[in-house]
Amino acid sequence: MSYNIDKPINLKKMKEIVLYLAKEVWGYKKTYYFVYLMDVLIKSMRPFINIIFPKLIIDELLGLRRMPVVITIVVVMIALNFVCGEIIVVTTQNLDKKYYDDIQKYLEAKIGLKIMKMNFESTENKQVLEKLQKAKESLGEGFSGGIRGIANTFSGMLSSIITLIGTIGIVLIHSKILILLVLVNVVINNFVSSKKNAVQFLNFKILSSISRSFNYFQVVLADIRYGKDVRLYNASDMMMTEIDGFYDKQINILKEQSTKISKYLGISSICSALTSGLCYFYMGYLALNRAIGIGDFSMLATASTTFIDAINSILKHLLDLQKKCVYANEYVSFMTLVQYNPTLGNRNLSGTNKFEIEFKNVSFRYPDTNIDVLKNISLRIQNGQRLSIVGQNGSGKTTLIKLLCRLYSVSEGEILLNGINILDYDYDEYIKKMTVVFQDFKILPLTIKENIALENTNNASDKEIISLLKRVGLKQKLDDLKEGLYSHVFKSYDLTGFEPSGGEQQKMAIARALYKNSPIVILDEPTAALDPIGEYEIYSQFNDLIGDKMAIYISHRLSSCKFCDKIAVLNEGKLCEYGTHDELIACNGIYANMYKVQAQYYI
Ligand code: ADP
């Protein structure tokens, strides 16, 4: 990530950000640009009606005094003002109603897609999570104002530039001194606005970190999964106090900000009034000395005010856009984050039926840490073999599986599948060969069928899924449900949905794994919440169901070891024992010791 939020954003960067967003909008809704440009053009032309027509009226009144001509000019002026006003109302409404909300949702949805495509390593990385939070916030009302905020600021700037070019001709023809007065006004306003922006920008960083903590507490309080713990440990009062604290902090910062900003706004208004006064004074002087006519006086007066307004408006919008781009940059830089891509390999694996996995001198440390959680692991799993990996909590068992699933890449050594580094294989083909049920597997608030078949739901046969559910012991439950396979799990989307027990969820996760029918299956303690006997039953049932597939069972208990060909014992990231049950018992080491303690459950 190259851009640092502490640095002011330059024009080149602003251009990049605006272009990035413009391209996104172009890709999503091209018709938007037609309405947008129409809006800009009409807004920029409108001021000229009130610059030119009053001069024409005054000239006619002081000259030939033809009433029909005067009336015609007045009517055309009113009609043009009315038509422009109506077109602006229609285009603005159109942009607001038809486009901005949709585009905003589209941009926000793209954050979700980006996260889904990110490598897993990034989704656990503190800096990336911080960036994600800022990217989400950056599109909000109080920051960049989202696509509506940026597009409105940009259109304000564009129409002011067009207006400026028109008025420049009119003012310059009559007096250069007027331009000088205008510049004084511009410099003062510019200075004041930059001060104001600096205050708001500084607070963005502080508010962003407060709001992250605040959101966390709100999520915990609103999430029913935390309900039991929050109630039993009486944590709600503590949390409410924390939330009140966050509110107070936020309010104090915003109060302080508004005091500072109103001071700057006051100075800016006084200076504007003074310079405008000076302009009128100077033009009055020219008219009195007959250097300009009364019609010209009227036109110049309006043109020079419009000129000042246009320049101030350009600078105001430019600074505003700069500020908005600082926030929007959080979005753009997150969306363009380039990172190690675990999906790069392209070696074909589709026709392969036999698999041998080898960990070769594998060491691993998590990003931003300096402790090796796996130390020089070498291990071979043959085709069709059952391997049980056991060890205390924290000994590195899950990490080993994360590496095998390419959620992280090894720090040293390599993992081979059939003698080839796993990273060389096409990611989608590689991952299809594997089914993993992690300890923190998720049953989703979808129907039972969708939970089992997931992406293949449309082609899945009900009969096959029912038979699977029967085999994992859920047939009775299914028969009890009115909608059978089509019953919703949980009540989040369907109030009549059923709430499965922990054990039922585990059985559904196992049915899902069996349905995927991959040649390599991994169970990473999905049964940890069960008692040792229940766990043992699930493992042995699963073991029967998977036939001759390669299986890796992970546990800090020995439930799975009985029916495994080999057992690997991890301790503090090292592979300290490896062999069959009998061999390890004979060694009288860690495994034998664990076995003695837990034997009552498995004999
Ligand atoms: P096990 O599965 O044997 O319980 P893990 O593989 O989950 O052990 O964890 C091994 C070590 O790695 C532990 O010390 C754990 O704290 C650490 N660890 C796990 N995940 C992360 C992570 N995302 N970032 C940093 N350290 C981690």
Image: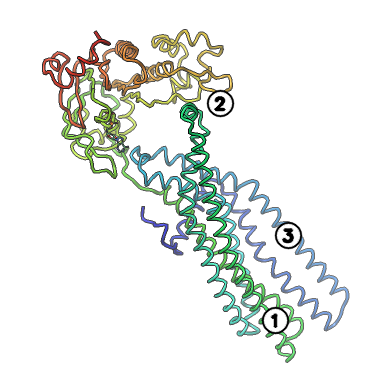
Separation of marks 1 and 2 at Cα, in angstroms? 66 Å
Disc 3 C-beta below 8 A from ligand 1: no
Pointer 3: what residue?
A: 85
Is 556 left or right of 485, judged from the image as shown?
left
Pointer 1: what residue?
A: 280
Which residue is outermost to the left?
A: 587
Give the image quadrant in which the ligand numbered 1 is located: top left
Is 237 left or right of 567, judged from the image as shown?
right
Amino acid beneath label 1: Tyr
Observer-nearest of 421 and 252: 252
Amino acid beneath label 2: Tyr
Amino acid beneath label 3: Gly
- Which disc number belongs to residue 66? none
The relative height of residue 8 versus residue 281 in the rendered view (above or below) is: above
The relative height of residue 201 versus residue 128 in the rendered view (above or below) is: below
Q: Are marks 3 and 1 in contact (CB under 8 Å)?
A: no
How many residues crowd mark 1 within 10 Å: few (<14), some (14–19), many (20+)? some
Helix, strand or loop status at disc 3: helix
Image coloring type: rainbow
Is 289 left or right of 452, judged from the image as shown?
right
Q: Are marks 2 and 3 in contact (CB under 8 Å)?
A: no
Which residue is outermost to the bottom?
A: 289
> What residue is drawn where x is 21% and y is 18%?
594
Separation of marks 2 and 3 at Cα, in angstroms? 46 Å
